[in-house]
Amino acid sequence: MCQVTPETIRRWVDQGEIPSTRTLGGHRRINLKDFQDFLKKRNMAPDGRIEVGETLTLLIACDDQTNKDLGKSIAKTVLNTKIDMVQSDFEAGLRVANDEPDYLFFQLDKTGSNVKAVVRALRGYARTRLIRVVAIGDPGAAKKSGADFSIVGAKDIDGLLKAYGK
């Protein structure tokens, strides 16, 4: 469940990180509530995904295949997310205005100019100023665009975890 070896679990128990009791035969027993509290404290979900406190709303504005791949990567990585996907800048603008997502994933073109315009527009309004923009593509172009974070591609799990502050 934790994607670690049994020895690691034993070490956590022996170090007191997970409360446990011992049976007459010397076997360790962990109360389910104590185990769930441990997972929550470590920001771990039983299946290895990270858990964010509140539900995050994500808007992915990319081509169809990137939307699908990124949606799968996020679903495998983070709990408590609501994911919306659009394929055009116009649809993205409507969703941002209506839904005010927590994160906007935007695919870079070769120059990063489309993201630069989006970031400038978002930062210009109090309602959308706090939306975190994640640029997908070349990290150099992402930095120039003004995006808050960048990921190399839809399957960049390390980049996703960084964007979520983990």
Image: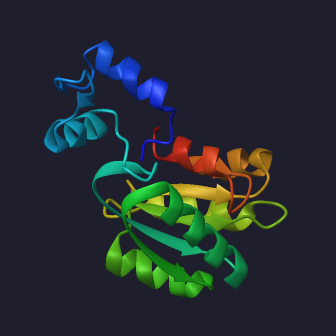
Q: Is residue 152 above or below residue 38?
A: below
The residue lying furthest to the top in this view is 15
x, y (%) of residue 123? Answer: 45, 56
Q: Is residue 157 visible?
A: yes
Quadrant for residue 39, please give it: top left
Q: Residue visible at 38% across and 23% down? A: 10
Residue at coordinates 71% horizontally, 51% vertically from top-left? 142
Furthest residue in direction right, as rendered: 110
Q: Answer left or right for 110 relative to 32.
A: right
Residue 145 image offset from top left, x and y in percent? 68, 53
* Quadrant in the picture for residue 119: bottom right
Closest to the observer, 95 or 14? 14
Relative depth, front residue between 103 and 3: 3
Q: Position of residue 5 (x, y in %)?
A: 51, 32
Q: Name the residue: 57% across, 50% down.
A: 160
User: As rendered, which of 158 and 126 lies closer to the eye?
Assistant: 158
Q: Residue furthest front?
A: 25
134 sits to left or right of 59: right
Which is more toward the observer, 149 or 45?
45
